[in-house]
């Protein structure tokens, strides 16, 4: 085993043992033996002995006269009933991005009346399956995982969920076509989001619309809602590729009647290309631009105050709803209810 991997494994063992200490109460509690820990973590007994020695040195663990084995030190014990692990993307990242904050804030608030410790460890492993095996060694009472929708990791999470592991997965918050877990996922109801945006634009009197974005779940809801009012977006009025936004939009505005442009997604470059093309047209003041209501979109509107830009959907509200739903599921897991549940789509 490479030295770097051995060090990582020892850190994992120490973190597990410290978690045992945190859960322990006012009496010393016997920890598993060297052989048991070596098998559990897939390391040598030498690595286990080194980890135990280091934790004895800082007095987290103790020995008792006349008794064999290693015990938790009550002076370090916290009697923490629950420990939740927080993971992001592929499990190698400890960074919390701003779109995750509303989810986490509402999640923490919903569980504030329960004594819980939260950890943000980085998983070891070169593949999703290896990282999931490492996750199991942490002995968390529950896990909240923010998925980035990569198929390999989603497949590994599906396998973990199938083992009845206590995990809630936050599905990708942006693009509706990214991979999602088959169970235990909570995310945005993209179809309902598309419908609500369409209704807002209908109420504003939009009739000749150009749609910038992928023709997927959100767009299907959007188009279906438009059709109820006898409106449509012709195929040629769809601009799906970021690379051709400026050229195709300029061509459409030159040759077709347009009173409004809707753009989904969260690409700052896409939004700015739209604004630049619109401002180059003589009739630009008559063209309204619609987008979602996230932080990128808000920055886009502030950067282009001369444009008529309307932000649709309360994205913050949706993400807060996702956090509350996730907290509710984990609370039920703590209460002994089923750990596996059908995916939840939070409506705007």
Image (cartoon, grey):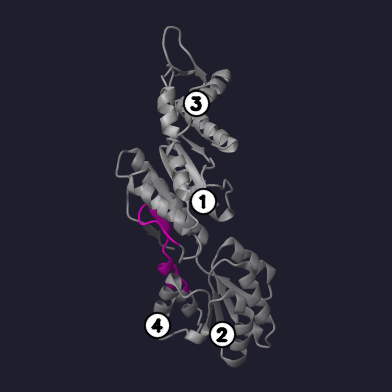
- Give the numbered dot on residue 227: 4
Labels 4 and 3: the sequence-earlier one: 3
Q: Is residue 81 visible?
A: no
Q: Residues within 10 Å of mark 4 (few under 14, many from 20)?
A: few
Q: Earlier in the sequence, mark 2 or mark 1?
A: 1
Q: Which residue is mark 3?
A: 48
Does residue 26 sit above or below 83 in this rendering?
Answer: above
Camera-nearest residue between 298 and 80: 80
Q: Magenta span covers which residues?
A: 179-197
- Residue 109 pos. (x, y %): 48, 44
Q: CA distance from mark 2 to mark 4?
A: 18 Å
Q: Residue at x 44, y 48 (%)?
A: 129
Report the number of numbered marks: 4
Q: Are marks 4 and 3 in contact (CB under 8 Å)?
A: no
Q: Secondary structure at mark 1?
A: loop
The percent coordinates of residue 30 (x first, y second) are 41, 19
Labels 2, 3: front one = 3
């Amino acid at each position: 085993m490479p030295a770097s991997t051995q060090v990582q494994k020892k850190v994992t063992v120490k973190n597990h043992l410290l978690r045992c200490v945190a859960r322990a109460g006012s009496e010393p509690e016997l920890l598993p033996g060297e052989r048991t820990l070596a098998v559990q973590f897939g390391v040598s007994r030498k690595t286990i002995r080194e980890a135990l020695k280091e934790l004895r040195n800082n007095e987290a663990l103790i020995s008792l006269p006349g008794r064999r084995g290693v015990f938790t030190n009550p002076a370090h014990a916290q009697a923490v009933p629950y420990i939740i692990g927080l993971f992001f993307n592929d499990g190698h990242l400890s960074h919390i991005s701003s779109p995750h904050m509303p989810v986490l804030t509402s999640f923490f608030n919903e569980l504030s009346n329960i004594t819980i410790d939260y950890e943000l460890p980085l998983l070891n492993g070169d593949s999703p399956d290896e990282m999931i095996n490492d996750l199991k060694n942490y002995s968390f009472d529950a896990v909240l995982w923010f998925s980035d929708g990569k198929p390999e990791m989603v497949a590994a999470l599906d396998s973990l969920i199938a083992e009845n592991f206590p995990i809630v997965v936050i599905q990708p918050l942006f693009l509706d076509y990214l991979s999602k877990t088959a169970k235990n996922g909570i995310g945005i109801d993209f179809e309902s989001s598309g419908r609500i945006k369409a209704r807002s634009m209908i109420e504003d009197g939009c009739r000749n619309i150009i749609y910038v974005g992928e023709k997927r779940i959100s767009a299907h809801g959007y188009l279906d809602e438009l059709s109820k009012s006898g409106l449509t977006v012709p195929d040629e009025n769809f601009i799906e590729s970021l690379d051709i936004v400026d050229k195709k939009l300029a061509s459409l505005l030159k040759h077709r009647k347009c009173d409004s442009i809707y753009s989904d997604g969260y690409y700052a470059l896409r939004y700015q290309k739209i604004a630049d093309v619109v401002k180059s047209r003589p009739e630009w003041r008559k063209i309204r631009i619609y987008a979602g209501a996230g932080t990128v979109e808000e920055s886009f509107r502030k950067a282009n105050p001369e444009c008529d830009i309307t932000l649709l959907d309360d994205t913050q509200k949706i993400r807060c709803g996702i956090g509350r739903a996730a907290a509710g599921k984990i609370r039920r897991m703590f209460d002994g209810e089923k750990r596996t549940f059908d995916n939840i789509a939070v409506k705007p």
